[in-house]
Image: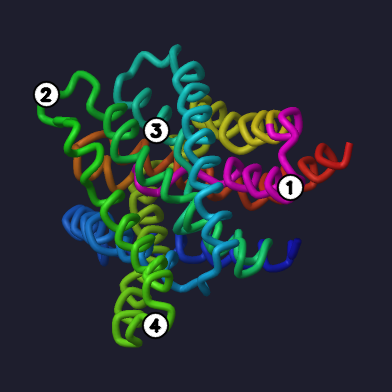
């Protein structure tokens, strides 16, 4: 695995976050801009990123089989992470903080940050598998994730229709169907203008979402960012304890080494930046949400390489 590429990506994301931080301090990004950019990413950028990632890979029946296998692994992964997150947050008294912490423990930044990191570590096949793995993320975030945020809120309605028909499931279905069109139409090639269209909108996601995180982080004082015991508890659980638990579980059930390392990397990623955007849209404590994302993103610069080294030692036992 290419650790140099990993550190390069993390450093780039840190600089983007710093740009967002200073843009907020200088008044370039305000509350209105932050909310509108969040809506842009959730409703346009993120769906296009899913479609782009699924349609870029070269078709083969082996890839298709691996892709569906990783969807299944992703479903189990998110169910386990959701259960552990619920247990770890039972002691929180502030309802907003509990919702945000539980959501952030369960969901990782598998797309905006995970895609480039997994591609750097595992190559093009890693990016392809990450796209299929991430299908489970979108199925869970719009169902289990919204259910977490909707607790004791009459204005957030979670219906069966919304669970299966949403901004995560529809792009996943479109992307998989486009990828599979080569089966009935062997000569099918996605038109270049559509491929570019999906790619350009997809490319908005990482820089804008990280800029928003930096901008929201700028609304917190240094004491709020670095002086909160809750944040350090969250970060330790998120970046070290849960990834190592996941790694040990994978080892005990006999998953192949590459698959174990892949899932461990997913678990070791910082909190999904989606929580800052959902918090903006649903009127939750967006400052605390940015704190969970920003702090975990900053600390992951050091923890992710260390967790990977520990995981390599565990799988070699």
- Viewer can see residue 106: yes
Crowding around mark 4 (Cα neighbors within 10 Å: few <14, some 14 to 19, many 20+) is: few
In space, the residues marked 1 and 4 are separated at their CA atoms by 37 Å
210, above or below 139, in the image: below
Alpha carbon separation for disc pair 1 and 2: 42 Å
Q: How far is mark 2 from mark 3, CA to CA?
A: 19 Å
Nearer the N terminus, badge 4 or badge 2? Answer: 2
Mark 1 to mark 3: distance in Å? 23 Å
Q: Residue at x 55, y 47 (%)?
A: 69
Name the main secondary structure of what is drawn in magenta.
Answer: helix
Quarter containing the N terminus: bottom right
Span shown in magenta: 250-275
CB-based contact (under 8 Å), mark 3 and mark 4: no
Q: Earlier in the sequence, mark 1 or mark 4?
A: 4
Q: In which quarter of the image is residue 203?
A: bottom left
Q: Earlier in the sequence, mark 1 or mark 2?
A: 2
Q: Residue furthest front?
A: 184
Task: Give the residue displayed 42% in from the left and 69% down from the top.
Answer: 183
Name the residue located 62 percent from the left edge and 44 percent from the top edge. Answer: 263
The extreme bottom residue here reads: 192
Tell me the residue that label 2 is attached to.
154
What percent of the width, then of the height, locates residue 48?
Answer: 31, 66
Q: Earlier in the sequence, mark 2 or mark 3?
A: 3
Q: Which residue lies under the disc numbered 4?
A: 189
Q: Is residue 140 above or below residue 88?
A: below
What residue is shown with label 3? Answer: 103
Comes first in the chain, label 1 or label 3: 3
Question: Which class describes the residues within 10 Å of circle 3: few (<14), some (14-19), or many (20+)?
Answer: many
* Of labels 3 and 4, the one closer to you: 4
- Which of the numbered marks, if any, corresponds to residue 308? 1
Q: Residue 214: within the magenta?
A: no
């Amino acid at each position: 695995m290419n650790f140099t590429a990993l550190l390069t990506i993390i450093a780039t994301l840190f600089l983007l976050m710093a740009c967002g931080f200073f843009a907020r301090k200088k008044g370039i990004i305000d509350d209105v801009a932050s909310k509108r950019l969040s809506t842009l990413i959730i409703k346009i950028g993120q769906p296009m990123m899913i479609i782009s990632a699924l349609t870029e890979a070269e078709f083969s029946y082996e890839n298709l089989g691996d892709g569906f296998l990783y969807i299944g692994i992703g479903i189990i992964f998110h169910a386990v992470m959701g259960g552990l997150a619920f247990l770890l947050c039972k002691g929180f008294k502030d309802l907003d903080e509990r919702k945000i912490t539980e959501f952030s423990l369960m969901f990782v930044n598998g797309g905006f940050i995970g895609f480039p990191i997994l591609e750097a570590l595992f190559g093009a096949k890693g990016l392809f598998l990450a796209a299929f793995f991430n299908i489970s993320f979108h199925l869970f975030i719009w169902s289990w994730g919204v259910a977490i945020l909707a607790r004791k809120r009459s204005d957030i309605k979670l219906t069966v229709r919304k669970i299966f028909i949403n901004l995560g499931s529809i792009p996943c279905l479109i992307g998989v169907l486009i990828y599979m069109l080569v089966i009935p139409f062997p000569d099918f090639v996605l038109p270049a203008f559509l491929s570019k269209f999906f790619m350009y909108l997809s490319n908005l996601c990482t820089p804008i979402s990280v800029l928003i995180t930096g901008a929201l982080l700028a609304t917190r004082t240094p004491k709020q960012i670095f002086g909160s015991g809750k944040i350090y508890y969250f970060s330790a659980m998120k970046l070290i304890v849960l990834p190592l638990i996941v790694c040990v579980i994978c080892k005990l059930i006999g998953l192949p080494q590459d698959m174990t390392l892949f899932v461990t990397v997913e678990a070791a990623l910082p909190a999904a930046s989606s929580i800052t955007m959902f918090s903006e849209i649903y009127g939750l404590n967006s400052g605390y949400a940015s704190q969970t994302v920003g702090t975990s993103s900053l600390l992951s610069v050091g923890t992710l390489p260390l967790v990977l080294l520990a995981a390599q030692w565990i799988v070699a036992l």
